[in-house]
Amino acid sequence: MYIAALLYVLVTGHSFLFTKVALEGGGPVDILAHRFVAAFLGLAIAMALGWVRVSFKKSEVLHILPLALFYPLSFFGFQTVGLMYATSAEAGIMMCTTPFQQTGGGRMRKESPISQ
C-alpha cells in the first residue's frame, strides 16, 4: 500500500516538474500534443507486442467517447495552463488537498461510502 502511494507521488510530482520545465521551451498546446502522441505510441507498441489486448464494440466506444475525450483534455490542459502561472511545488500542494476536498464534498452531499 505504501509503495503504491510512494509511486503515485513520484509520478505526479515528476509530471508537474517535467511539465514546468517543458513550458520554458514551448506552449501548452505543444506540450499536450507531445504528451498525447507519446501515450498513443506507447499503447500502440504495447498492443503490437501483444502486451495489451483491446477489443471494443462500436456501441461501447460511442457510449464512453465523450468522457474519454473530455477528461484527459481538460485535466492535462488545466494542469499545463495552471503550471504556467504557479510553481510545481504549489501544484503539488493543491494536489494534496484533493482527498480532503472529496471527503468534504461527500459529507456535504450526505453520501455514504461505497464499501460498507
Image: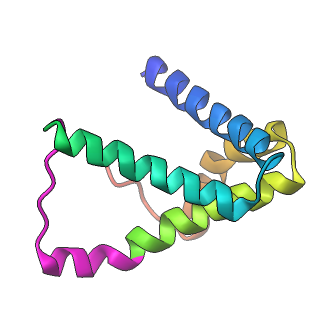
Q: Residue furthest top?
A: 3
104 on left or right of 91: left
Residue 52 percent coordinates (x, y): 18, 42
The stretch drawn in magenta includes residue 36 = no
Q: Residue drawn 76% across and 61% down? A: 81
The residue lying toward the viewer, choosing from 17 and 111, is 17
From the viewer's perspective, is residue 24 above or below residue 82?
Answer: above
Location of residue 70 with respect to 48 vertically, above or below: below
106 sits left or right of 44 in the view: right
Q: Number of callouts in the render?
A: 0
Q: What's the residue at 52%, 31% (across, down)? A: 8
Residue 55, placed above or below residue 91? below
Q: What colour-coding does the image apply?
A: rainbow
**Is residue 64 at least partly visible in the picture?**
yes
Q: x, y percentage for residue 36?
A: 49, 56
Q: Position of residue 41 (x, y in %)?
A: 37, 47
Q: Which residues are magenta?
A: 51-66
- Dividing the picture into quadrants, the one containing residue 93 is top right
Residue 78, located in which quarter of the rendered image? Answer: bottom right
Query: Which image quarter: residue 106?
Result: bottom right
- Image height check: is 96 above or below 111? above
Residue occupying the point 34% across, 55% down: 114
Q: Quadrant of the N terminus?
A: top left
Residue 110 image position (x, y, % from top left)? 52, 67
Q: Residue at x 66, y 59 (%)?
A: 30
Q: Nearer the viewer, residue 107 or 61?
A: 61
Relative horizontal placement of residue 47, taking residue 99 as reference (left or right)? left
Q: Quick check: can you spot residue 116?
A: no
